[in-house]
Amino acid sequence: MSAAPKHDVYQAIADSSRREMLMLLAKNDASIKEISEHFSISRTAIVKHLNVLSDANLVSDRKAGRSKIYSLQPEQLAEVKEWVSYFEQFWDNKLSMLRHMVEDDGEE
Amino acid sequence: MSAAPKHDVYQAIADSSRREMLMLLAKNDASIKEISEHFSISRTAIVKHLNVLSDANLVSDRKAGRSKIYSLQPEQLAEVKEWVSYFEQFWDNKLSMLRHMVEDDGEE
DNA sequence: TCTATATAAAACCGAATGGTGTCATATCAA
DNA sequence: TTGATATGACACCATTCGGTTTTATATAGA
């Protein structure tokens, strides 16, 4: 039922600036201007990155006066987690066993 | 000490063909030809993808007669897992708490 | 109303990406 | 040796990506 993302989450997190933006938004919601202050690239470039994150449903935004506030929407990251989890058995058995034990409550 | 990857792991897994290749190699080592048979794109394209995976240290290869056999080398995926884990608290507290408990043995 | 502020929108650019096809080389097997 | 097989190495192509600058619009406040 979730909107089909134009950019998928893997593509969205492929860029380190975008990963930093997600980390930033994990701490606090922020306007475009506030986000820009943490990076050396232009505001336009920031907005493009935010659009990619938005297309991948990793952030949401709301208007507030003349600013646009972005919020983290991390649910889609669960997909990445799931995918990577498949490989956990190859480097850490203890953890993947625990995961199986714990995660037995409503997976599809 | 690990060789500095030219392509990073996030970029490597951004492409769905490359993710499929990793899944494939998780089941069995495979030659370029064998891998190619699972995809509709050209062998040349396959090789390029494998080079990206190799640059990111996600696969290794060995020569065997006239074939080149690729193996999964999943250690670098731990980095992705770690990064995504930071966000787990936002959608699953139980798991991230457990992770902290279990993972307390030698994380530098 | 006027001005400063925050964002939007568009055109442009070089480099990287994902793909192709062609030709060359190495190796196995008759 | 010869032919088929598996890979390597190029050159080429269209599109996307990450970035820029410029111009326009909306809103808050004095």
Image: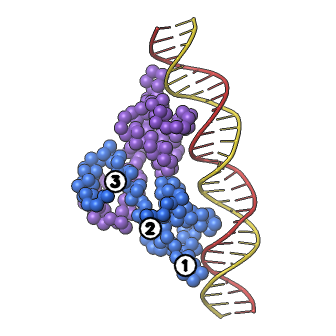
Chain colours: A purple, B blue, C yellow, D red
Q: Tell whether label 2 touches label 1 (CB within 8 Å).
A: no
The residue under the point 48% across, 57% down is B9
Residue where numbered disc 2 is placed:
B73
Image position of A93 (left or right of D23): left
Residue where numbered disc 3 is placed:
A108
Q: CA distance from mark 3 to mark 2?
A: 29 Å
Image position of A88 (left or right of C5): left
Is residue D25 depicted above or below D2 in this figure?
Answer: above
Tell if the residue under mark 1 belongs to the same chain as the one under mark 2: yes
Residue B35 screen position, x and y as percent: 54, 70
- What is the residue that sits farthest to the front in this orientation? B1
Q: CA distance from mark 1 to mark 3?
A: 42 Å
Q: Is residue B64 visible?
A: yes
Is residue C1 depicted above or below A86 in this figure?
Answer: above
Residue where numbered disc 1 is placed:
B63
Q: Is residue A55 visible?
A: no
Query: Is label 3 or label 2 in front?
Result: 2
- In depth, the one of D30 and B40 nearer the eye is D30
The residue under the point 50% across, 48% down is A15
The residue under the point 30% across, 45% down is B89
Q: Earlier in the sequence, mark 1 or mark 2?
A: 1
Tag 3: amino acid: Glu
Task: State the SS at label 3.
Answer: loop
Residue D12 screen position, x and y as percent: 75, 58
Q: Which mark is residue A73?
A: none
Residue B65, by quadrant, is bottom right
Q: Chain of mark 2?
A: B
Q: CA distance from mark 1 to mark 2?
A: 16 Å
Tag 2: amino acid: Gln
Q: Tell whether label 3 touches label 1 (CB within 8 Å).
A: no
Residue D8 screen position, x and y as percent: 63, 72
